Image (tube, rainbow, N blue to C red):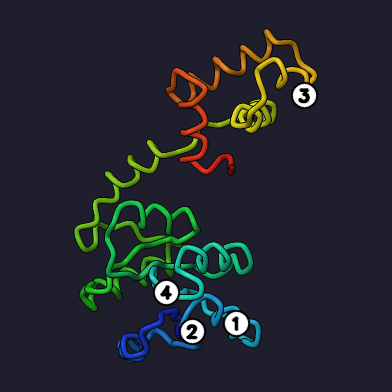
Amino acid sequence: MKTKIGLVDDHQLFLKSLSLMLESFKVYEVILEASNGKDLQEKIKNKRELPEIMLIDVNMPVMNGVETAKWLSENYPEIKPVALSMNADDNTIISMFKAGCCGYLLKDTHPNELEKALDEINRKGYYNADAGNINFSRILMKAEEKEEPLLSPKEATFLKYACSELTYKQIASEMNLSERTIDGYREALFKKFSVQSRVGLCLEAIRKELVKL
């Protein structure tokens, strides 16, 4: 039985060419083609059979690859999302993996490598070979460095208040805590974010998108 594939890419010529290439491998059947994430949402709900693997372009209008992969992972966890892009930027690769992708392939990947990758994804559920000179070990190390510090619910609440105009005394009152406890939260977050001031803390929180002003 052939493995069912879905394709999401806004470039129609590439989409059709890729579809023909996959069909030529004899073991794959393309059952869904969409031009972006929104188009995918509309088309997939009418499918009686779902793709087992979904190849997703990163840069698309309306709904991009990260948003599409995340939506797919949340709503159709049985489908294996795979990023397919011309972009080998570390941050893009990290974003797609965080969105739920089990592989990242470059569009100039050799057909033999593509077939090998799809076979591994089908059998193992992931593909992490060093295809297209993507150094996954280095990227994963970078991803770990970018991980946001874990915050307790109280620390998260304090952080939100710390990025407001409230004084520490007022924050203590709002949280029904002593000023000494608030001082403890402040010092703990300074350490977690590697900052030395309230301004630095706020800037890091905004940069990491932990708070919105």
Measured as percent of width and height from the top left, residue 123 is found at 43, 66
Q: Residue at x 33, y 40 (%)?
A: 141
The residue indicated by pointer 3 is 174
Of the two numbered discs 4 and 1 in the rendering, the one whose residue sits closer to the viewer: 4
In the picture shown, does residue 135 fall above or below 42?
Answer: above
Q: Residue at x 51, y 39 (%)?
A: 206
Amino acid beneath label 3: Glu
Please identify the quarter of the rendering in which residue 180 is found.
top right
Measured as percent of width and height from the top left, residue 125 is found at 45, 62
Q: Are marks 2 and 4 in contact (CB under 8 Å)?
A: no
Measured as percent of width and height from the top left, residue 67 is found at 52, 65
Amino acid beneath label 4: Met
Q: Mark 2: which secondary structure?
A: strand
Whole-number angstrom distance, CA of label 2 to CA of label 4: 11 Å
Mark 1 surroundings within 10 Å by alpha-carbon count, few (fewer than 14), some (14 through 19), many (20 or more): some
Q: Are marks 1 and 3 in contact (CB under 8 Å)?
A: no
Q: Residue at x 63, y 67 (%)?
A: 75
Residue 44 is marked as 1
Q: Mark 4: which secondary structure?
A: loop
Mark 2 surroundings within 10 Å by alpha-carbon count, few (fewer than 14), some (14 through 19), many (20 or more): many
User: Nearest the camera: 108 or 95?
Assistant: 95
User: Nearest the camera: 57 or 79?
Assistant: 57
The residue indicated by pointer 4 is 60
Q: Residue furthest top?
A: 180
First reached walking from the N terminus: tag 1 or tag 3: 1
Residue 34 is marked as 2
Whole-number angstrom distance, CA of label 4 to CA of label 1: 18 Å
In the picture shown, does residue 72 fall above or below 23?
Answer: above
